[in-house]
């Protein structure tokens, strides 16, 4: 049965064109699906279990989508709610939903799909040989799993379908693959499986597959032989080039995409312009395989304090690297003597902004910067120690001389205090898949009546 | 001999998950694509990014006039030593590579 999916944008919180959304709703979609997250901004969201987007932006956009849902009379689905899709951010999104439902006087059936995993679950799976590393993967063992602040499994189409089949009007899903929320309904209705996953991948970043990437809204029509994609903004055109090029985006392999239960192969996909705005795609293949779900996890890798100084004097700007090398040797010795800390129990990393700040050892260009920013990053086992090291090094970062016989220099600190406590440093600690005998084995579904 | 970026439409890079960076060279025309294919070798790209050649994935995509490289991150995204959370600066090295 043909299925029409409306995708308002690549992620909730980044905005979409309101007129384009209205045009999408007028096309009478069967479902509205949007992504709520990604690992793209780094490990903090998963580590801390917090959304990276503000509650205000999220609520404002979600309110528009809840109104669109009421108008269209079809389910509204968000995947990877609250950036990381941990249970805490699913509940955060649920709270926002309840608040809006009350304000709008909507009575709703809301399903929550939880993706968080306990360390015990993964440890058991590991012991049973059901956890396989991807390339490259950090090493894991029971203690390292126990140290992770959050572990999530990525739900696929089957878990989303279970949520849809509850009859919920709104589905708030924890971590899902980027594509699962879009592919679930077409697959459930018997549309072409290769087309369902391929069309979902093309639409998962909203209008990024069109000539007007920031306009957001996309409509995809799935059927028994392929899919057709169209952007809703008047100036946004989907062309065979813009659509096929999207398979390159954030993918290591532009032809193969792994999902729970198999993979998509678009090697033989054909992209045809139906007119100036719409592209038809056929020939994508779904290749069934083992039923595995990908795991993501984050752990605390220390606590940080930073300090920023600017070297404006021409001599110091030209010799910044040498200065930092001397300073580091001096500070290592000072910290060792005054705090009795061995050099391997903490780290101080000075980044030279204006020299090689972004690329480090890979940088192959040299210039003559007017000034050099020296960003010192202290990483230590506790925030108290990191802060103490920050205070200890502060006067030297301000005054350390390149040569012994010169008058003490003073560099620029842009603010007071010069040090900033950054809190926990999280790191990604899993790049594995876990085999499950039943798709719902690693996930939990609850349905709640809200509003009125 | 001139920078690659002056011979193609654009070069972009981005994380592909926390453990990989992927770099896309959009050549923009069949002529530019053919020229880049004949001059750009994977070993030089691997050296540019300080990565063993056998770890570099390369895709020559004739339909799009695109050459794509995927490279495992030497530093995982967001780890203490990471300098570029989104991996977008990697493109500049290839953009500036003279060939």
Image (cartoon, grey):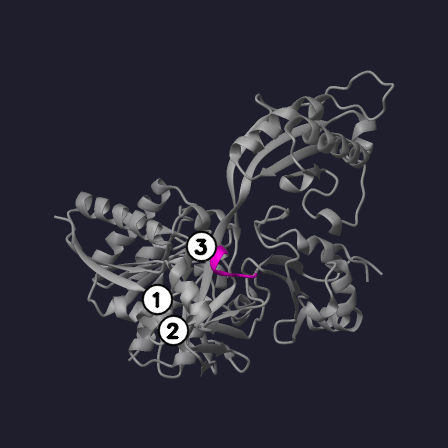
Graded by Cα atoms within 10 Å as few (under 14), some (14 to 19) or many (20 or more), the crowding at tag 3 reads some
The answer to whether A318 appears left or right of A275 in the picture is right
**In this view, the mark in front (3 or 1):** 3
Residue position for label 3 = A146
Q: Which residues are magenta?
A: A139-143
Q: Report how far apart the C-alphas of labels 3 and 1 lie in the structure.
A: 17 Å
Residue depicted at 64% across the width and 54% down the height: B75
Residue position for label 1 = A442
The answer to whether A299 appears left or right of A313 in the picture is left
Under circle 3, the secondary element is helix
Q: Report how far apart the C-alphas of labels 2 and 3 lie in the structure.
A: 20 Å
Q: Earlier in the sequence, mark 1 or mark 2?
A: 2
CB under 8 Å between callouts 1 and 2? yes
**In this view, the mark in front (2 or 3):** 3
Q: Chain of mark 3?
A: A
Residue position for label 2 = A436
Residue depicted at 31% across the width and 72% down the height: A185
């Amino acid at each position: 049965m043909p299925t029409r999916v409306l995708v308002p944008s690549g992620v909730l919180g980044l905005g979409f064109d309101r007129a384009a959304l209205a045009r999408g709703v007028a096309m009478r979609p069967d479902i509205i699906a949007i992504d709520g997250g990604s690992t793209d901004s780094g490990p903090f969201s998963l580590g801390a279990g917090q959304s990276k987007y503000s509650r205000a932006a999220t609520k404002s956009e979600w309110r528009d989508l809840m109104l669109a849902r009421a108008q269209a009379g079809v389910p509204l689905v968000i995947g990877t709610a609250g950036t990381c899709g941990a249970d805490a951010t699913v509940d955060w999104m649920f709270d926002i939903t309840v608040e809006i439902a009350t304000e709008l006087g909507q009575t709703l059936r809301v399903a929550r799909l939880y993706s968080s995993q306990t360390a015990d679950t993964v440890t058991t799976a590991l012991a049973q040989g059901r956890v396989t590393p991807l390339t490259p993967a950090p090493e894991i063992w029971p203690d390292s799993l126990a140290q992770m602040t959050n572990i999530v499994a990525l739900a696929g189409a089957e878990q989303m379908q279970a949520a849809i089949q509850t009859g919920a009007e709104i589905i708030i899903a924890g971590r899902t693959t980027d594509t699962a929320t879009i592919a679930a309904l077409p697959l459930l209705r018997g549309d072409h499986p290769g087309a369902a996953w391929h069309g979902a991948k093309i639409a998962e970043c909203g209008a990024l597959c069109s000539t007007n990437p920031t306009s957001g809204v996309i409509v995809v029509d799935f059927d028994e032989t392929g899919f057709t994609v169209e952007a809703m903004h008047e100036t946004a055109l989907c062309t065979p080039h813009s659509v096929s090029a999207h398979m390159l985006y954030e993918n290591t392999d532009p032809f193969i995409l792994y999902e729970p239960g198999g993979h998509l192969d678009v090697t033989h996909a054909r992209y045809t312009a139906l007119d100036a705005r719409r592209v038809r795609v056929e020939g994508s293949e779904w290749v069934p395989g083992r039923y595995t779900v990908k795991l993501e996890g984050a752990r605390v890798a220390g606590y940080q304090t930073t300090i920023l100084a600017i070297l404006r004097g021409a001599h110091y700007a030209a010799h910044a690297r040498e200065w930092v090398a001397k300073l580091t040797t001096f500070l290592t010795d000072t910290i060792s003597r005054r705090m009795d800390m061995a050099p391997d129990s903490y780290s101080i990393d000075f980044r030279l902004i204006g020299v090689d700040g972004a690329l480090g050892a890979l940088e192959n260009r040299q210039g003559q910067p007017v000034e050099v920013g020296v960003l010192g990053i202290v990483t230590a086992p506790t925030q108290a120690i990191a802060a103490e090291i920050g205070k200890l090094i502060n006067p030297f970062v301000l005054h350390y001389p390149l040569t012994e016989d010169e008058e003490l220099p003073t560099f620029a600190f842009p603010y007071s205090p010069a040090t900033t406590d950054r809190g926990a440093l999280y790191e990604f600690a899993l790049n594995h898949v876990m085999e499950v005998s039943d798709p719902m084995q690693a996930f939990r579904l609850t349905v709640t009546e809200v509003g009125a | 001999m001139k920078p690659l970026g002056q011979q193609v439409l654009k070069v972009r890079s981005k994380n592909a998950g926390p453990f990989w960076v992927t770099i896309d060279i959009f050549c923009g025309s069949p002529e530019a694509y053919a020229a880049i294919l004949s001059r750009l070798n994977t070993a030089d790209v691997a050296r540019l990014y300080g990565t063993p050649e056998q770890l570099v994935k390369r895709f020559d995509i004739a339909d799009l006039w695109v050459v794509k490289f995927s490279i495992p991150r030497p530093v995982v995204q967001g780890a203490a030593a990471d300098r570029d959370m989104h991996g977008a600066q990697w493109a500049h090295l290839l953009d500036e590579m003279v060939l």
